[in-house]
Each structure stands twice: as C-alpha cells, then as structure tokens.
Amino acid sequence: MLNLSSNKILQISPFLGYYHLEHLNLGTFLNSVEFNQIKYIENLSVLSKLKELNLSYNQIGSIENVSSLKELKSLKLSKNKIKTIENLESLENLEVLKLDYN
C-alpha cells in the first residue's frame, strides 16, 4: 500500500517502478485540514495490479484514464467535482464505487 493522502499533491506523477502496487491512497484522512488537489486521473496505466484506488477529496472533474486498471475492485471518488458517471465499462472487477458529494 502506498498512502499519499493529505499532502497537497497537485497531479499524479508516473508510478514507474511500482508495477506490483495493489493499494493507492491519494485521498485524505478524516478530520484532516490538508487535502490533495488533483484535477485529472492520469499516469496510472503502469499500475496493472492495482485493486484499490482512493482519490476522494480532490478536484477531479471527470472519470478518465482508468481503462487499464483491469484488476481494480474499489474506486473511491467522493468529494470531487464529477458530474457524469462514465468510462467505467472496462472495470469488470469493480465491486465498490464511491461517488458521494460530487
């Protein structure tokens, strides 16, 4: 697991060398006053083993660039700026999708 929550991160940098990563948290801790400020879902294509992705409490406006995450079981996008639920067709293993407060 890689936890990068509550770090004022502005964008997702390429995760080269993290090919076997299964859990990635770019969201926030409860009661935290600092948030990441990610606007776009990007640079995740090398994370083909990823099972859980938390991008809650960011500034994301649309669901994109997730089609390569074939193993993904949990996608958390609460408290963003998403208006339309789209681009999830390829996520056949997805069991949990959180989109509240968008």
Image (tube, rainbow, N blue to C red):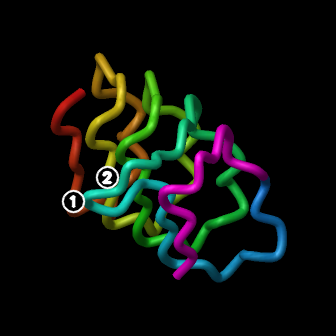
**SS at circle 1:** strand
Q: Where is residue 49 in the image (x, y as percent from the top left)?
A: 56, 75
Furthest-right residue in this view: 16
- Report the predominant secondary structure element of the magenta stretch: loop
- Looking at the rendered structure, the kind of residue marked 1 is Val
Q: Where is residue 64 in the image (x, y as percent from the top left)?
A: 52, 33
Q: Nearer the viewer, residue 63 or 34?
A: 34
Residue 74 among those drawn in magenta: no
Q: Which residue lies furthest to the top in this view?
A: 83
Give the image quarter of residue 37: top right
Q: Is residue 12 left or right of residue 69?
A: right
Whether residue 94 is situated above or below residue 20 in the rendered picture: above
Rendered residue at 33%/67% (across/down): 73
> Taking 3 as reference, is 29 above or below it?
above
SS for callout 2: strand
Q: What residue sits right under mark 2 in the picture?
A: 76
Residue 7 falls left or right of residue 90: right
Cβ atoms under marks 1 and 2 closer than 8 Å: yes
Residue holding disc 1:
96
Q: Give the range drawn in magenta.
A: 1-13
In magenta segment, residue 4: yes
The amino acid on which the numbered mark 2 sits, given as a three-letter code, is: Lys
- Of labels 1 and 2, earlier in sequence is 2
User: What is the residue that sits farthest to the left in this orientation?
Assistant: 100
Query: Residue 20's spot in the image, x, y percent?
Result: 65, 82
Closer to us: 88 or 12? 12
| C-alpha span from label 1 to label 2 | 8 Å
Q: Is disc 1 surrounded by few (<14), some (14 to 19) or many (20+) residues within 10 Å?
A: few
Q: Which of 1 and 48 is in front in this view?
A: 1
Picture residue at 68% right of the left edge, 47% below the top: 12
